[in-house]
Image (spheres, rainbow, N blue to C red):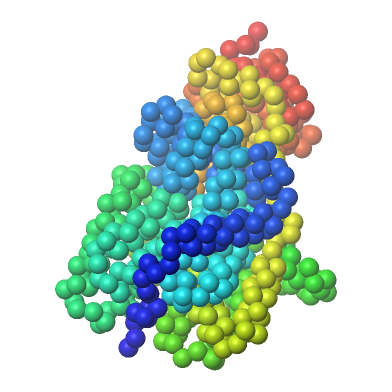
Amino acid sequence: MKFIFPAEAIQDTSVKSSRRKIAEGLGIAFLYLLLFVISTYPAITVFDSHFIGQGDTSQNAWNLWWVHRALSQGHLNIYDTPMLYHPDGVTLAFHTLAPFNGVLGAAFQEFLGTNLPLTYNLLTLFTFVGSGITMYLLIYSLTRHSLAAIVAGLVFTFSPFRMSRVFFGNLEVYSTQFIPLLVLLLIKMQRHLHIKYAIGAALMLALTTWCSLELAFGAGLLTCLLALLGIGNFKWKAWWLVWGSFGLSALVMILPVVLPMLLHQQSFLTETDQFAAATANSADLLGFFLPDNTIHSGLGNLNLLRANSRISQIYSQFYGNPCEKTVFLGYTVLGIVLITLLKARSSAIYQWCGISAVFFILCLGPVLQIGGKLLGSMPYRLFFYLPFLKYGRTPSRLAIYLMLALAIVVGYGVAELCQRSKVRYYAMGLLGILIFCEFLIIPLRFDNRLLKLSSYYRVLAKQKEESPILDVPVDLYGAQGPASDYMLYQTIHQQPIVGGYISRIPANALAVFEYPFIYQLRARLYKDHAPYDFSPEVMAVAEGNLEALGVRYIILHKDALSEPETLQLYNTLHEVLASSLYEDEYVVVWERNSRR
């Protein structure tokens, strides 16, 4: 059987002049830069003040701030922070910290003097241009066809799933720039059985892991599939040598990310049962074939309003988290894949279709969902029996690897079709433009919260001593609560806070929220609509609870509460802490040692 990567497709590119290579590389980089500007417009006009995307932008912006702060202060262990969940701090072992983005962002801030929004947006730009270029290199190596490489790069870089992660601010999930290089180097490793390619592939896997644990999970699965497809094609000793070198090198390079998880695993035993969350965060089968017009505008651009309305009705019936349902494959992409399967006779194409089928099934999660109905068990369920993988709860995010496999099939198909006539060459170019337009999200969301915050935060930043803060309402939940806002505000006031919003929370970090007075200050979210209960018994321990937390400032956030709630909590805190220290349209601030 011909191996998935035809030997004749991978050739030495030394015949090209260096000047032509440089010009070609700059041209491809400029193309993806231009497409990034178009797809994110008007981001270019607010590049240093607004974050691209909205949702988890605050969490990812905090990651960049924390890594820069830790490294600039000489704290090399970035996986332990005293800045969240005061007074004890918290481990970030199972948090989506994305240390690669953090270190690169720290370099931007330290040496270029970029502010946080500009740093975040530069990293976003880097992921787009990087993903486009590396996908181009992969497909060009396979097909020796520039247009095929460009079109495949469009499919991968601007796929609806990846753009939805930009929309929702998941910087760590769309940091996909090293994945095509991983595949390319695995190809060369299988072709040449040379250790240098094994080490290079291990480095790409490690860099992907340093970008995202979720991406690492998918990259590991893809690597295993490629290894299985290579069994029987080479001499066993050489095969084991290169794969052994790859595995050992990868293990050493990802150890700084994995070691904190091993050391703190016992603290996260309450986070191992993620079956319900994984079901809620799985793809719905219909989502692969219907654009999510709650964020996607492809159909809207064609003014098919009636179709949009029907699609909205279908999506509204989906089970679980709507933010994880955007896995649309694209009609143009599906058409090219179908034509490629009918016209081409390459075993590599069939095998890449097989890989895409594997990720298609895994995206559906532990339970099959069709139109919001739960119908039966799926293979993803097996991951809950494996160490560490049982912590996973977002199967739909494997769609990035589904789109990678489909992009490779598209690349093969475009190269094959273009060889037959110039008319088809221009037709494929037009289809590339159609793919880009079909995948556009208009309008893209932007986060401008740093422009709408209290000026008092900058006063707090000038405090010479550490001044811990209790933000009210207290967030016990994270995902839909105000804790992510508090973390964003922390990047300005620079003080430790009680609470936070991290991906996995150790049980001991939540103990302080059990204090009766602190518990009553909680935000009412989800099914929690209990009225505030500041009984005499609760008020009697209020000052003691605040003392136990060791906080200096209590900040009441008006914008996180209704007017009646704001008034009730204002009066309660006034009774406990006396007159407020500061008030504006956003916050009321008390200093705990200022009681009369």
Residue 8 placement, left or right of 247: right
Task: Identify the image quadrant of residue 472.
Answer: top right
What residue sits 54% from the left and 30% below the top? 497
Image quarter where the N terminus lies is: bottom left
Task: Identify the image quadrant of residue 450.
Answer: top right
Using the image, determine if residue 561 lies above or below residue 409. above
| Residue 161 visible in this rendered orientation of the protein | no
What residue sits 43% from the left and 36% below the top? 90
Image quarter where the C terminus lies is: top right
What residue sits 53% from the left and 80% below the top? 415
Percent x, y of residue 429:
64, 75
In the image, farthest residue toward the left: 237
Using the image, determine if residue 556 lies above or below residue 359. above
How many numbered discs? Answer: 0
What residue sits 32% from the left and 59% below the top? 200
Percent x, y of residue 430:
68, 76
Percent x, y of residue 328:
62, 71
